[in-house]
């Protein structure tokens, strides 16, 4: 059965994977072009906040009552 708790768990898993992939690609981009480290870091922080925001919206949108 697909429950509300399972949906929140999937959102958390997706958010964690998304932030992990984002961090890996940002580190790879910085390794390839160290001069672009600051813009890459800025974009990575903004995208990580957006990914985390989607999970937070999902967690608070579910009514467990």
Image (cartoon, rainbow, N blue to C red):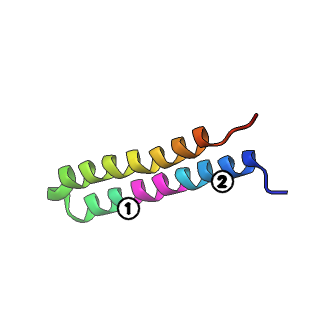
Side (left or right) of 50 relative to 38: right
Residue at 25%, 65% (x, y): give it: 32
Mark 2 falls on what kind of element?
Answer: helix
Q: Which residue is mark 2?
A: 10
Whether residue 15 is in magenta: the answer is no
Figure check: 24 above or below 45: below
Tell me where residue 2 appears, x and y as whole percent.
Answer: 79, 56
**Would you say 36 lies left or right of 55 here?**
left
Check if residue 20 falls in the magenta segment: yes
Nearer to us in this view, 12 or 32: 12
Checking the image for residue 25, the label placed there is 1
- Of the residues tagged 2 and 1, which is closer to the observer? 2
Extreme residue in the bottom direction: 32
Instruction: State which region is magenta.
Output: 17-24
Dot 1: within a 10 Å radius of its alpha carbon, few (fewer than 14), some, or many (20 or more) residues?
some
Residue 65: quadrant of the picture:
top right
């Amino acid at each position: 059965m697909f429950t509300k708790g399972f949906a929140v768990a999937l959102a958390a898993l997706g958010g964690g994977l998304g932030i992990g992939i984002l961090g890996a690609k940002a580190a790879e981009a910085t390794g390839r072009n160290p001069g672009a480290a600051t813009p890459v870091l800025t974009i990575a922080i903004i995208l990580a906040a957006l990914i985390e925001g989607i999970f937070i919206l999902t967690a608070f949108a579910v009514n467990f009552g």
